[in-house]
Image: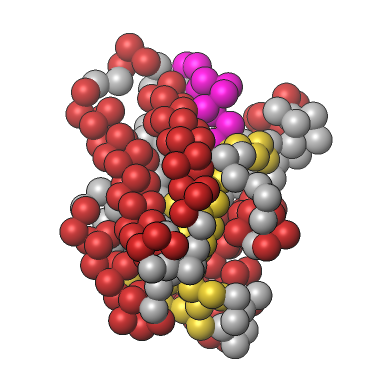
Amino acid sequence: MCGVMVITGGSQGIGAATARIAAARGYKVAISYRSGEAYAAKVLADIAAAGGTAIAVQADATDERATEALFARVDREWGNVTALVNNAGTTGPIRRLDAVDGALLDDMMRLNVTGCFIALREAVKRMATDLGGAGGAIVNVSSRASEIGGANEFVHYAATKGAIDSFTIGAARELGGRGIRVNAVNPGMIETEIHAKAGDAGRTTRAIPVIPLGRVGTADEVAKVILWLLSDEASYVTGALIPIGGGR
């Protein structure tokens, strides 16, 4: 077996793709979800049909106690986590920055930033060699928006992902000597349901002319980079922010 993986927000999109591929490669996979129970059940069914091992835990990433309970459940089932994919997040609605209020910003920061921090903290408690762990690897799911900026659509989202990039670099430098590698993937235009949730299902199609590779990406393409970063093949990679945007 490859080890024990926790994927926050693992019921759809990039998280679900990562769960399916990770389980096929031998990981025991725990996915969390906030409200998409039916989607989570489908991921588990797919993994079971392929001979893999997985559980799904309802855990709102904005709830610190729920995240602690998620990791405690994994402890009971399989022992210490060895890989974390910090995927739970939202773009929020499409808004120009002058239409973004404090309540929206608070909600997005709690999910995209605080939720990521708390999950990483819980993983560190179990992975860190100075705390008795065997080490491990963490991938935070950021976005190309952190560099592009999201003007006229997602400046609020881009700001949260900029925080994740900084968090990734800082955590990597702090945790490298404790047996933990921390990296981030920065997906660009990826064909998932996130665009429809934001209110613009056709956004990816309109973006194709500005993508040098001439197409949008898939969740599986992002998942495979995540799994490489978690693998021993990336054993000397930490603090990296990997763009997955077709050149954009």
Percent x, y of residue 50: 62, 84
Asked if residue 181 is positioned above or below residue 90 in the image, the reply reads: below
Tell me the residue at 69%/45% (across/down).
Answer: 217
Q: Quadrant of the N terminus?
A: bottom right
Percent x, y of residue 140: 49, 47
Q: Is residue 172 magenta?
A: no
Percent x, y of residue 138: 50, 54
Asked if residue 100 is positioned above or below residue 30 in the image, the reply reads: above
Q: Is residue 16 visible?
A: no
Q: Is residue 117 visible?
A: yes
Q: Nearer the viewer, residue 38 or 223?
A: 223
On screen, residue 52 versus residue 211, left or right, reads left
Quadrant of res 102:
top left
Q: Quadrant of the C terminus?
A: top right
Q: Nearer the viewer, residue 94 or 44?
A: 44
Tell me the residue at 42%/68% (across/down).
Answer: 133
Percent x, y of residue 163: 42, 30
Tell me the residue at 30%/50% (across/down).
Answer: 118
Asked if residue 171 is positioned above or below residue 66 in the image, the reply reads: above
Tell me the residue at 35%/75% (across/down).
Answer: 74
Region rendered in magenta: 140-152
Colour setting: secondary structure
On screen, residue 125 versus residue 217, left or right, reads left
Asked if residue 213 is positioned above or below residue 38 in the image, the reply reads: above
